[in-house]
Amino acid sequence: MKSTLGGYAHLPRMIDKCRAVLAGTEGEYIYPCPMDERLMEFAGITSDQFTAAVKAHTTDEGVLAWFQRHTQPHLPEELEEWNQRLLARGPSSPESAAKFNKYLQAIDPSRTDLTAWSDLQDLEEGRVVPQRIREPHTHRS
């Protein structure tokens, strides 16, 4: 999840998921998922446009070249800030939190330190996710 392509977090995963959907081998992958939609919205493209680009280009580099020609340009600082927000994003509703916790329980219930979807995806796909130290709550009187 944290790997980038052309400086965009999530872009390599989105390409892989789109290819899997096109090939009918997506299994449990969802494309376009909310993270895909956030990236496409930030870039100023639609899932139909992106899917057509993935169909037309057999390599990640080809998709990246298309992406760079057809998306809204961003300053490096804007892109880095957006990447960090995306990677830190956790559940945003009670329903989303329940879904997150269900997946976490199925993958590794001992990882109560995880709060971001990107960490959960990395863990699910077998990538190392460092333990997070939670800040203790302090109560002031």
Image (cartoon, rainbow, N blue to C red):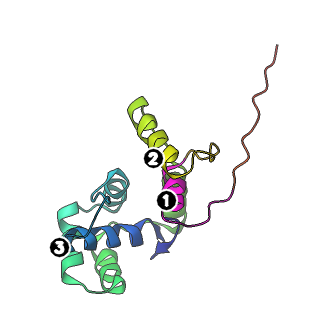
Mark found first going from the N terminus, 3 or 2: 3
Residue 118 is at least partly visible in this image: yes
Q: Residues within 10 Å of mark 1 (few under 14, many from 20)?
A: some
Instruction: Residue 103: give its label.
Output: 2
Q: Is residue 84 above or below residue 21?
A: above
Residue extending farthest to the right is 141
Label 2's element?
Answer: helix
Residue at the limit of the structure toward the top, as seen here: 141
Mark 3 or 1: the one toward you: 1
Secondary structure of residue under mark 1: helix
Q: Which residue is mark 3?
A: 52
What type is the residue that disc 3 sits on? Ala
Whole-percent x, y for residue 99 in the image: 41, 40
Between the residue at mark 1 and the residue at mark 2, the CA separation in whole angstroms equals 9 Å
Contact (CB < 8 A) between labels 3 and 2?
A: no
Write the start and end of the magenta stretch as one range: 116-130
Residue drawn at x 34%, y 63% as measured from the top left: 43
- Is residue 140 on the magenta stretch? no
Determine if residue 92 is in view: no
Q: Which mark is residue 124?
A: 1
In the image shown, does 111 or 39 lie closer to the viewer? Answer: 111
**Image vertical order of residue 12 relative to residue 40, above or below:** below
